Structures are given as C-alpha cells and as structure tokens.
Image (cartoon, helix red, strand yellow):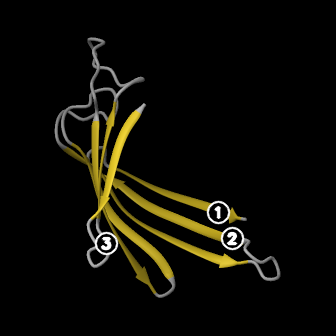
Amino acid sequence: MELGVAWRVTEKVPVTLSWNTMLFGGDRKNDGSRNYSTYAEIVYPFRASSVDMNAGVGMTLRATENMYGTTGFAVTNVFVGARKMWPVQKQGSVQIGIFTNLIWNPGQEKVNFLGDLSFMF
C-alpha cells in the first residue's frame, strides 16, 4: 500500500509535484524492518501541435534498498510522453487513443519505451 499526494501549482504554472511513500507490502530493509521508500516527481504538461505532451523527473529521496535499489538520493526517472485521442466517426462519445512514454533511469543506466492503445466509451 502506498500513500500519495499530488499538487498542481496553478493554471498559469501547470507543474505538478507529487510525493509517494510505501507504507505496507514488500518494501522491507534487508533486516526485515519497514523501509518507507519515498518517490517524488515533478511533471510539466505542454501541447505540441494537437498532441498532449508531458516531461518530468522523478527521484528517490533516501535509501530504498529493496524497492528502487538506491543507496540514497537518486534520480530514477527522466521522461517525456505524448498522448493523442481521436473520436470514432458515427459512434458519438467513443474515442481511440495512443500514449507513448520514453523513460530514462540514469541510476541504472536503462532506457524504456512504453506504448499504449486505449479505447474510451
């Protein structure tokens, strides 16, 4: 179980700040005690042409030995994403969407590309 809080600064400054802490579950230290791994993220949404975009950075704030594999403060997520929705003709409120996200974890030197196809009714 994780407890999370997110805050969007203002309409003019649409940056979202979020904080998430693991309370229960597999988040344990090597000695078996709770780790309370904490992850924070800053996200900036923007629009390019007719595509909704976002860019952000996420980090662990302290050692999270069995959750994120860090030994202290570490940037674990640098990303840029895009989302586009299209209405389906003659179907009223039905939409088809594509979502992509390019993610870099500098701490683990890994790059991931995610893709999603969605249908909204």
In the image, residue 52 sits, relative to residue 75, either above or below, namely below
Q: Nearer the viewer, mark 1 or mark 3?
A: 3
- Numbered tag placed on residue 78 in the rendering: none
- The local crowd at label 3, few if under 14, some if 14 to 19, many if 20 or more residues have their Cα within 10 Å, is some
- Numbered tag placed on residue 96 in the rendering: 2
- Residue at x-position 26% and y-position 45%: 107
Q: Position of residue 21 (x, y in %)?
A: 31, 36
Please state which of residues 1 and 117 is positioned toward the viewer in this rendering.
1
Which quarter of the rendered picture does the C terminus lie within? bottom right
Q: Amino acid at mark 2?
A: Ile
- Residue at x-position 78% and y-position 82%: 89
Could you give the CA–CA distance between mark 1 and mark 2, rounded to whole angstroms? 7 Å
- The local crowd at label 2, few if under 14, some if 14 to 19, many if 20 or more residues have their Cα within 10 Å, is some
Mark 2, secondary structure of its residue: strand
Toward the front, the furthest residue is: 10
Q: Position of residue 113 (x, y in %)?
A: 48, 58
- For the residues bearing labels 1 and 2, Cβ distance under 8 angstroms: yes
Residue 87, quarter of the rendered image = bottom right
Q: Position of residue 114 (x, y in %)?
A: 52, 57
Mark sitting earlier along the chain (1/2): 2
- The local crowd at label 1, few if under 14, some if 14 to 19, many if 20 or more residues have their Cα within 10 Å, is few
Mark sitting earlier along the chain (1/3): 3
Please state which of residues 114 and 45 is positioned toward the viewer in this rendering.
45
- Residue at x-position 39% and y-position 57%: 103
Residue where numbered disc 3 is placed: 14
Residue where numbered disc 1 is placed: 117
Toward the bottom, the furthest residue is: 49
Q: Nearer the viewer, mark 3 or mark 2?
A: 3
Q: Amino acid at mark 1?
A: Leu
